[in-house]
Amino acid sequence: QKEVEQNSGPLSVPEGAIASLNCTYSDRVSQSFFWYRQYSGKSPELIMSIYSNGDKEDGRFTAQLNKASQYVSLLIRDSQPSDSATYLCAVNPFYNTNAGKSTFGDGTTLTVKP
Amino acid sequence: IAGITQAPTSQILAAGRRMTLRCTQDMRHNAMYWYRQDLGLGLRLIHYSNTAGTTGKGEVPDGYSVSRANTDDFPLTLASAVPSQTSVYFCASSDGTLIPQFFGPGTRLTVL
């Protein structure tokens, strides 16, 4: 079992719809969770971070964390063609004292169709 | 310089040659990382450094070496390149256990 698993995708949604990206992790003591967006041919960029159970909203993006279920998701409301990218989920383990040593999922590719 | 820079942007290299990928950050972050990204395999950690003077092995360290002489620079060396090292290489940095990482623009390396 991989430490961080994401829907393999690709995921396609129409413009204006809600895109839902899912991520599960195996290390129960993980403390911090991140979503990165990566456009084709570019480097990953951080779009959301979440540390506590519940929802965290930032503009059209909402991250949801459920530590009991070891599940983190990213919702994109009113999806735009410019949201078309690969989304990477990353998890930092609590017990690991190495600063910032995140484990990444393989990513889900999202296409928003006009 | 703003953030993380990497050089070269791309490189074609003959198998067996030695190559050093450069990475410099100006954020004074303690931790730096090298990842490779291959199609379908996501980001895989090669080596990391928690602070200047220390380094550690990641998930796929074989064939690569790093050094961290100072806070800003973290070069990655391929001693004798092989075709399986064809990949996109990203350098990243962070400061603190729960602070996310920031990435450089990447180096696209092709080994023939």
Image: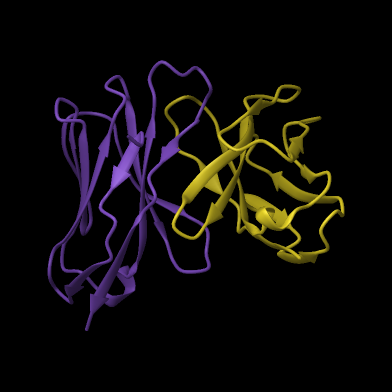
Q: Quadrant of the C terminus of chain B?
A: bottom right
Residue A21 in the figure: left or right of residue A108: left
- Compared to residue A69, the image places residue B8 above or below, namely below
Tell me, yes or no, if residue B29 can be seen here: no
Which of the pair A51/B41 is nearer the observer? B41
Q: Residue B73, located in which quarter of the rendered image?
A: top right
Residue furthest right as drawn: B17
Residue B17 in the figure: left or right of residue A54: right
User: What is the basis of the colouring in this image?
Assistant: by chain
Residue shown at 83% from the left, 44% from the top: B79
Q: Quadrant of the N terminus of chain B?
A: bottom right
Q: Residue B98, located in which quarter of the rendered image?
A: top left
Q: Position of residue A100 (x, y in %)?
A: 49, 31
Which of the pair B87/A31 is nearer the observer? B87
The number of numbered discs placed on residues in the rendered structure image is 0
Residue shown at 23% from the left, 56% from the top: A59
Q: Chain A takes which shade in the image?
A: purple
Residue B33 in the figure: left or right of residue B20: left
Q: Position of residue A58 (x, y in %)?
A: 24, 51
Residue shown at 53% from the left, 56% from the top: B38
Q: Position of residue B53 (x, y in %)?
A: 76, 22
Tell me, yes or no, if residue B16 can be seen here: yes
Q: Chain B takes which shade in the image?
A: yellow
Q: Position of residue B94 (x, y in %)?
A: 54, 35
Residue shown at 45% from the left, 34% from the top: A102
